[in-house]
């Protein structure tokens, strides 16, 4: 590296923000973070924001995270890479030069070209998605004065499971607040594979299935979605009547990589060398990289620390270290105060699992904020926030953030 050590990071999510924070206090670097959103999205609590929780638990302004850090923050979308000139170009035609480039763009929702899904389904990939879903659940009770016949979640992965775990009780609660008589509310979870979390051990899938049934979720396993219309989801050639289908079943790599001629693996993730480089000086991390545990926040954080550490080694004229993948701890919340934890060969179920998950959230918030602010944000996980005119005034609990 030359004496300037200009590092450009693209993507203000788990991997990008972590890399920036790791380099921020090292005066040998000039760090620019380019990202298309002004907030950091804490995805693990989006299901809670969608079911009556506060937005602030899943969204932290980047300006707060970097308030006292030497990071040049640019709110823009990177659209092109020039490997020869070592520049990236943004949507507003801003050209930014780099000596090291770190790409952490995350993934996009994939609808697999299934007819009607993109148009009619809801999602929980962003805080705005979560709030849109929450608003819909209430509006539908206002407009039709009765709950939907079926609420359908598609996807038996972690996101579908965590949402399914709390949706039945939330629907009962808001139906009551809307003054509607107590009625059977159906929450269905549709999964194409014959079991939940098919890549996890079978006993874990069984425990999660049992827990979801216990909280009132009907499981449709081995069931393939064929199409969606305004009032039904077609599965295995039969319709499930519903105005509320939540799609959590597919992600695809960010199209930037295919468009910019990166070498892609079969799963469309970027092939990298042992230093997570796709090209000299271009590092690809987190969900975008074809690494063994890609697709987890823990991996994106680990990758960010790894790349930052190697950039520091290079700045000190030391050889970079090769990457060794780290197995994450898997946590699946599935109901109030219930989570399954898979930690190596250890399994923990129930309230203790949930407690571990809750503590992990606190530690994660502290990655971005001082303890005092992180603790207040963490405590707000128990608060309620509604925009519904029938539910809001008495429900918003003040926490002072
Ligand atoms: C609902 C949900 C729950 C999850 N729960 C967990 C969990 O409990 N535990 C866990 O380990 N993992 C969880 N994950 C997965 C985890 O969030 C991801 O693995 C992690 O976010 C990946 O980090 P990243 O930095 O690669 O991408 P991201 O965190 O997605 O960050 C990418 C950022 O880049 C921005 N960006 C994209 N393109 C551009 C561009 N061209 N120019 C500028 N900016 C751009 C995006 O807007 C985004 O801000 C969850 C994911 C979801 C969706």
Image (tube, rainbow, N blue to C red):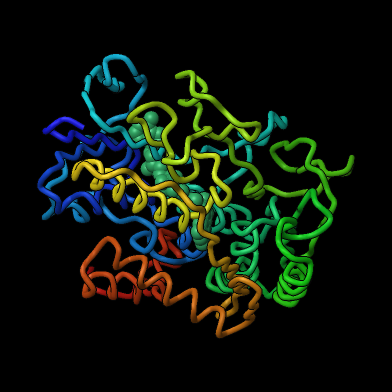
Q: Relative to 212, is 69 on the left or the right?
A: left
Q: Residue at x 83, y 44 (%)?
A: 235
The quarter holding residue 364 reads bottom left
Q: Residue at x 65, y 69 (%)?
A: 168
In this rendering, does residue 56 appear at all?
yes
Which image quarter is the C terminus in?
bottom left
In this rendering, does residue 128 appear at all?
no
The quarter holding residue 314 reads top left
Coordinates of residue 161 in the picture (x, y in percent): 65, 62
From what the image shows, is residue 278 above or below residue 72? above
Residue nearer the viewer, 261 or 379: 261
Which image quarter is the N terminus in?
top left
**Numbered-mark total:** 0
From what the image shows, is residue 113 above or below residue 67? above
Coordinates of residue 74 in the picture (x, y in percent): 21, 35
Q: Relative to 151, is 265 on the left or the right?
A: left
Q: Relative to 19, is 4 on the left or the right?
A: left
Q: Residue at x 44, y 30 (%)?
A: 278
Name the outermost residue toward the right.
237
Coordinates of residue 212 in the picture (x, y in percent): 71, 71
Q: Residue at x 55, y 40 (%)?
A: 290
From what the image shows, is residue 340 above or below residue 121? below
Name the outermost residue toward the bottom.
352
Residue nearer the viewer, 131 or 343: 343
Q: Relative to 72, is 241 on the left or the right?
A: right
Name the outermost residue toward the front.
318
Residue nearer the viewer, 132 or 164: 164
Coordinates of residue 376 in the picture (x, y in percent): 28, 74
């Amino acid at each position: 590296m030359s004496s300037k050590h200009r590092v450009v990071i693209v993507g203000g999510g788990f991997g990008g923000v972590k890399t920036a924070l790791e380099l921020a206090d090292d005066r040998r670097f000039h760090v620019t973070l380019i990202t298309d959103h002004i907030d950091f999205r804490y995805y693990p609590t989006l299901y809670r924001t969608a079911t009556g929780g506060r937005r602030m638990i899943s969204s932290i302004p980047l300006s707060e995270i970097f308030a006292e850090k030497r990071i040049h923050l640019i709110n823009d979308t990177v659209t092109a890479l020039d490997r020869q000139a070592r520049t990236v170009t943004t949507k507003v035609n801003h050209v930014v030069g780099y000596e090291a480039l770190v790409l952490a763009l995350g993934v996009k929702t994939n609808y697999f070209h299934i007819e009607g899904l993109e148009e009619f389904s809801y999602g929980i990939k962003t805080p705005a998605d979560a709030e849109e879903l929450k608003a819909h659940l209430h509006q539908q009770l206002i407009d039709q004065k009765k709950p939907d016949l079926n609420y359908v979640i598609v996807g038996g992965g972690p996101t579908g499971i965590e949402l399914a775990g709390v949706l039945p009780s939330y629907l009962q609660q808001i139906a009551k607040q809307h003054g509607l008589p107590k009625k059977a509310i159906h929450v269905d979870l549709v999964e194409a594979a014959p079991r939940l979390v098919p890549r996890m051990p079978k006993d874990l899938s069984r425990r999660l299935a049992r827990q979801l049934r216990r909280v009132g979720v009907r499981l449709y396993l081995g069931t393939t979605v064929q199409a969606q219309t305004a009032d039904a989801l077609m599965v295995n050639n039969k319709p499930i009547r519903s105005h509320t289908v939540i799609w959590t079943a597919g992600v695809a790599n960010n199209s930037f990589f295919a468009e910019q001629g990166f070498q892609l693996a079969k799963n469309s993730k970027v092939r990298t060398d042992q230093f997570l480089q796709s090209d000299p000086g271009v590092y690809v991390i987190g969900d975008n990289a074809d690494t063994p545990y890609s697709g987890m926040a823990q991996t994106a954080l680990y990758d960010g620390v790894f790349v930052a550490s190697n950039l520091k080694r290079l700045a000190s004229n030391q050889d970079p270290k090769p990457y060794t993948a780290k197995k994450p701890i898997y946590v699946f919340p599935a109901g109030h105060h219930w989570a399954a934890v898979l930690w190596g060969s250890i399994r923990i179920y129930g309230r203790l699992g949930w407690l571990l998950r809750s503590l992990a959230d606190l530690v994660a918030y502290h990655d971005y904020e001082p303890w005092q602010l992180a603790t207040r944000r963490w405590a707000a996980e128990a608060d309620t926030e509604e925009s519904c005119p029938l539910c809001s005034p008495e429900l918003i609990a003040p926490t002072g953030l």
